[in-house]
Image: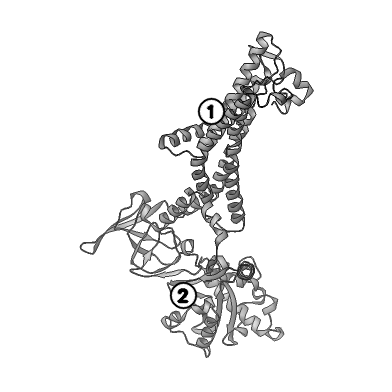
Amino acid sequence: TSMILMKIPASHSYLRRIAFFGINREELVCWALATPVQFISGGRFYRESYHSVKNGKLGMSFLIAMGTTAAYLYSIAAVAYNAISRCCGCSRPVLMQSFESSSLLITFVLLGKYLEALAKNRTSKAVSALADLAPDSATLVGTFDETSKSSSSEPERIIPLSLLQKNDILLVRPGEKVPTDGVVKSGSTTIDESMLTGESMPVVKIEGDKLIGGTINLQGSVNMVVEELGEDTALAQVIQLIETAQSSKANIQEVADSIAAVFTPFVIAAALTTYCVWAILLNCGPLDEIKDTWPYRRQGFNDWTLPLLFAISVLVIACPCALGLATPTAVMVGTGLGARLGILIRGGEPLESSKDLTCVVFDKTGTLTRGEMAVQDILLLSDRLAVEMHDEKSRCGSEMSDIDTVRDARRVATANMFYYAACAEQGSEHPIATAILSKARDYGIGNGLDRPLDEVDGFEADAGKGVKCTVNNTAVHLGNRRCLAANDVNISPGTFDAMEYLENKGQTAVVISINGTSEAVVGLIDHAKEEAALTVNVLQHVLGIQVFMLTGDNVRTAN
């Protein structure tokens, strides 16, 4: 108000008018606006100062409270001095109040606190997303007795997660989330654990295997025994780790607090020294020859109040609003930039220590790679699918309407192969199914495209092996070596060689069999991100940082 409105002619004369008791409107408005800032917005600094004095360890909050209070009390004294002068009709100069100084100091520090909270809020959203991974309810089907190693069944019922107890037996159906940590009691399935491990390939779970709460059951139904609940689950421990990191301070903030413990008494001593030195100089003669040329008497000061102004200036200038604003701002900018680039920085401490990094360890899946499977290589084992006509011309498309006019028999065979594979995998959320359906769309195969998918009969998914079904009276099998053996598939020459070739290239080999005979081997891979190579090269050759990759895959895939 005093710095802006007083420069506007229309408001200048209005604010200079006396409101009451010799106080003009400018002083009254500034006082009224500064008081809630000082004692409501800045109340936290008084509370923290009280506890720091009580504990005998003065911190930054004490400096802020002391500096802003000094400016606020000086401004009240200036207003009182001016009011008395006006009421008495004295022609003494008017003292300038400094309410805006205390208010701006508090505002800057609180702005820093806000920016710090804003940075932590980004991580809080990640914590909330993790918490949402756990389902709200579970299907209870019995209990397990550890002593007798026996189980008792009861009618299936849905209960809230909060009512679960250890050794409860739960039913987890395909597509459902695992309610809590436990172990498979019966059945087999594949579990998507990417939310915790980052691995895109599902993990086969059989009797006795551990299950993690929040992961997704993809295929088979299993009964599980509850082992951990609440804060003891793996998901809860991850959340607790992030929350602990959020509450940690950056080292520079702790250094500032430790310095403040010594700096605060020093500032008080410096302010007292400033007052004493200037009082002696102004009242004991050393400055008598030159002080009369100074304008401080015309501004309402005397030889005792001018040293007081200097002492208050020391307190205000020593207020550490720069540290209170600069550190949180740096944390906010650093974490914000990292979040936009897909890097979650857990707080100020790891951000500050990153300048001393000499080694970086990257997780492979989802960090250096995209975290999703894609078809890389297609190896046909015969030309039988190139001459097989699946349906009438209108359904197969012009490309397949007349085999004599097809220029690329391989493309026809590949398209037919992906048609059967896509029909078998439609509706599945398995990463391999997603990759095959995506590749089939490149050939115009899929619902809403040139060649729509047909319904399948007798669909069965065997965890850890593959799937089988019938498409228009054609038997289709997709899977690995165990799938071939379990279904007595006739192995075409070169099948195992093709699988080994793809696996040596770091790909996941899937055999597609039609009518009991292997017809093709498809290689799937999790592609590296486009910027991965550039990032690694910059870290190694520009910044001189060692780079390692951490993966649960085999050596061939890692290489």
Image height check: is 359 above or below 516?
above
Question: Which type of secondary structure does the marked residue at label 2 adopt?
Answer: strand
Q: Is residue 455 visible?
A: no
Q: Earlier in the sequence, mark 2 or mark 1?
A: 1
Residue for point 36% across, 55% down: 232
Question: Which type of secondary structure does the marked residue at label 1 adopt?
Answer: helix
Three-letter amino acid code at disc 2?
Gly
Image height check: is 264 above or below 76?
below
Quarter of the N terminus within the rendering:
top right
Q: In the rendering, at what x and y percent does residue 324 appear?
A: 57, 42
Residue for point 44% across, 39% down: 57
Q: Is residue 154 visible?
A: yes
Please tell me whether mark 2 or mark 1 is closer to you in this view: 1
Task: Give the residue furthest to the left.
Answer: 148
Q: In the rendering, at what x and y percent does residue 3 appear?
A: 71, 28
Q: Which residue is mark 1?
A: 39
Q: Which residue is mark 2?
A: 466
Q: In the rendering, at what x and y percent does residue 215 appear?
A: 44, 61
Picture quadrant where residue 156 is located: bottom left
Label 2 neighbourhood size at 10 Å, few (<14), some (14-19), many (20+)?
many
For residue 90, side relative to residue 519 (left or right): right
Disc 2 versus disc 1: distance between alpha carbons? 69 Å
Label 1 neighbourhood size at 10 Å, few (<14), some (14-19), many (20+)?
some
